[in-house]
Image: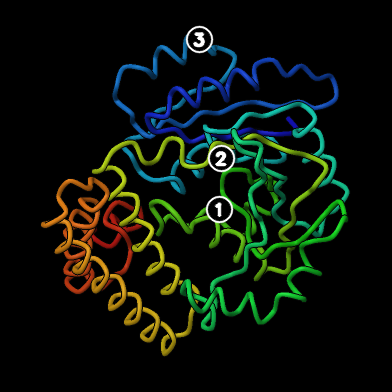
Amino acid sequence: MDISIIIVNYRGWKALDECLESIDVIISKTVSFEVIIVDNFSNDGQFDVFKQKYSKFTFIENSGNNGFSNGCNFGASIATGNHFLFLNPDTKLTFEALKTLLQTAVSHPEIGILSCLQINENAVFYKQNNLFPALGRFFGISRSLFRKRNKANLEKRFNNTDNLFYPDWVTGAVIFISRDWFNKIKGWNEDYWLYFEDVDLCKKVSDKGGKVAVTRKATIFHQHGGASRLNVKTKALTKTEVIISKHVYINNQFPAAIQLYLHSLLILGVLSEKIILSLLSLFLFFIPKLKVNRLMLKNLSIYYFNAIQKQTWISPRAMNYLKIKA
């Protein structure tokens, strides 16, 4: 098998349906592939419906909503392909993109992780000039200042006409990686429940001497965020996990002295912002978006208390947290 396409789903059935339809029509005599859908225990009655509708594909049900990293690793554990294509359910695949990813990866063994151009429903291409978080550009303001100071170098790096360009990291929505590279970096890091796991994956490849690349010869449709923020409660949860994953990344990728500095700035900045916005929401209760901040403040307060008590930054939702509890 050339490629194992691995898709992790959690109640994103509408988007998944369109994704699987786009794959179902692909017929190829030159590229062999299998499709594995890992459902993170949606538990809403749709799993069996989809399993019957797309009987050519492999459906496996996870033990719970165990996060993106765990779902990807679960899918990879039963995959038979020489290459893995991790794909979000809110994408649409074409044969041309699949073939290009495989051919490019095979002809460029120095590439550890490969992605392609992504376009949304408004025909807008996503920016993929991503840089690893660093001390001088970890937060929004410092990151913007860094990009302004280094504008010429960054434009030279990304705004060229080459078939391949090389960001520090690519989004987990489209990640093509060989089985050899996947095993070399020991898969996805299950310290993360959601967000930053793709940055961490690319950092591990980079640390092992591999390149992270994007090919301009292939484009995949991606409706960003289509399945992750369905209501106020879900939005607060996912936005909270962004903050938590930042703490996990700091803990995993920075020296101890810098960790303390970045953790402190992140806590101070986030709590100050959420306290102010939560107080405003009491007076401006007719603005639904402000309610998200109250829920986030509650979630983060619980998380920080738990982090002190358990001596870990890992999200309580992440699978590696269970190992700490044990």
Local secondary structure at mark 2: helix
**Which of marks 3 and 1 precedes in the sequence?**
3
Above or below — where is 37 with respect to 298?
A: above
Q: Give the label on residue 204, or none.
A: none
Above or below — where is 296 with respect to 13?
A: below
Q: Nearer the viewer, residue 273 or 312?
A: 273
Q: Give the label on residue 53, or none.
A: 3
Few, some or many residues within 10 Å of mark 1 (<14, 14–19, 20+): some
Q: Nearer the viewer, residue 5 or 121?
A: 121
Determine which quarter of the picture holds residue 1.
top right
**Colouring scheme applied when the structure was drawn:** rainbow
Few, some or many residues within 10 Å of mark 3 (<14, 14–19, 20+): few
Where, quadrant-wise, is the C terminus in this rendering? bottom left
Q: Is residue 175 left or right of residue 243?
A: right
Q: Amino acid at mark 2?
A: Ala
Above or below — where is 84 with respect to 325?
A: above
Residue under the point 23% across and 45% down = 288
Local secondary structure at mark 1: loop
Residue under the point 55% across and 61% down = 199
Q: Which residue is mark 2?
A: 76
Q: Which residue is mark 1?
A: 187
Residue under the point 31% across and 17% down = 45
Marks 1 and 2 close (CB-CB < 8 Å): yes
Residue under the point 64% across and 21% down = 22
Q: Where is residue 316 drawn, in percent x and y? A: 26, 56
Q: Amino acid at mark 3?
A: Lys
